[in-house]
Amino acid sequence: MTITHTVRASLITGAAIFLAASGASASTVISYTTNATGTEFVGGVNSDVLNSNGGAAATLTFTPNSNSNTGVPSNVDLGDFLLVCTTCTTAQTTTFGSFIFDLIVTDSTDGATGEFIGTSTGGTVSSNSGTIQVNWQSPLTIGPGATGAMTGNFGNTHFDMIAPITLVPAPDSGTPQGDVTIQGQVGSVVPEPATFGLIGGALVGLGLIRRKLVRA
């Protein structure tokens, strides 16, 4: 009788674990921001605004995502670059020198932060054209766990940079003009299908044992 009760308890516990694991990603909501201290143009700039260094006056500004809640998995907004040159024409141009940009992602749900690093050789901009692009350096994933973490632990959560290159549009292109959103993804690590198979097989095995014990 004691063995039967033990098997029954194991079946209930195993089923609960199986259901919890299979439904974990569907019920998870992650809160994140990209406005932490350290999100900035670096290398003597240390600001979220980069000024042009030649030609017409222009600025490249980063606007962070200050507060978002999203289900997992989903596409996420990691912030925007905005290029402004009010005096640029098709003939009048401005230039930007090379730069480095640090993007800090704060996962407030899990209590962790991580960093994406972008580099650019700069470029020339007129009102209707531009050559600035930001190349995101590997790794393009932060999390899960302590992978790529600056502080804390991401647990099962991971943030991914969708594209390794962000192209900055000309000041009169895009919606809104001169704006580009840095696209990312947030996901959660779940057991491999093989793991589910092992759990399921164990439950079936326990069920067969219980049936034999009952018949006995």
Image: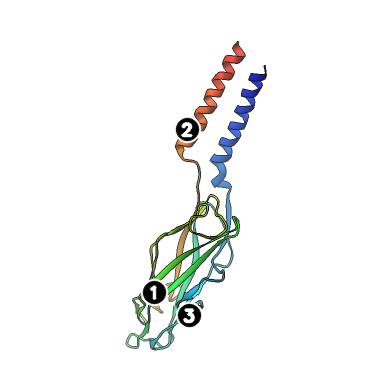
Helix, strand or loop at mark 3? loop
Q: Position of residue 173 (x, y in %)?
A: 39, 75
Farthest residue toward the left?
A: 91
> Tag on residue 197?
2
Label 2 sits on what residue type?
Answer: Gly
* SS assignment at label 1: loop
Q: Earlier in the sequence, mark 3 or mark 2?
A: 3
**Residue designated by label 3:** 45
Q: Nearer the viewer, residue 20 or 153?
A: 153
**Front-most of residues 143 and 184:** 143
Circle 2: element type: helix
Mark 2 and mark 1 residues within 8 Å of each other at the beta carbon: no
Quadrant (top left, top right, bottom left, bottom right) of the N terminus? top right
Is 132 placed left or right of 143 in the picture? left
The label number, if any, that marks residue 169 in the structure image = 1
Tell me if label 1 and label 3 are in contact, CB under 8 Å: no
Nearer the camera: disc 3 or disc 2: 3
Looking at the image, which is closer to me, 181 or 206?
A: 206
Q: Earlier in the sequence, mark 1 or mark 3?
A: 3
Q: CA distance from mark 1 to mark 3?
A: 22 Å
For the residues marked 2 and 1, what is the alpha-carbon distance in whole angstroms? 48 Å
Give the residue type that dot 3 points to: Val
Residue 157 to residue 15: above or below: below
Q: Residue at x 60, y 15 (%)?
A: 213
Q: Quadrant of the C terminus?
A: top right
Give the residue displayed 52% in from the left and 25% down from the top: 204
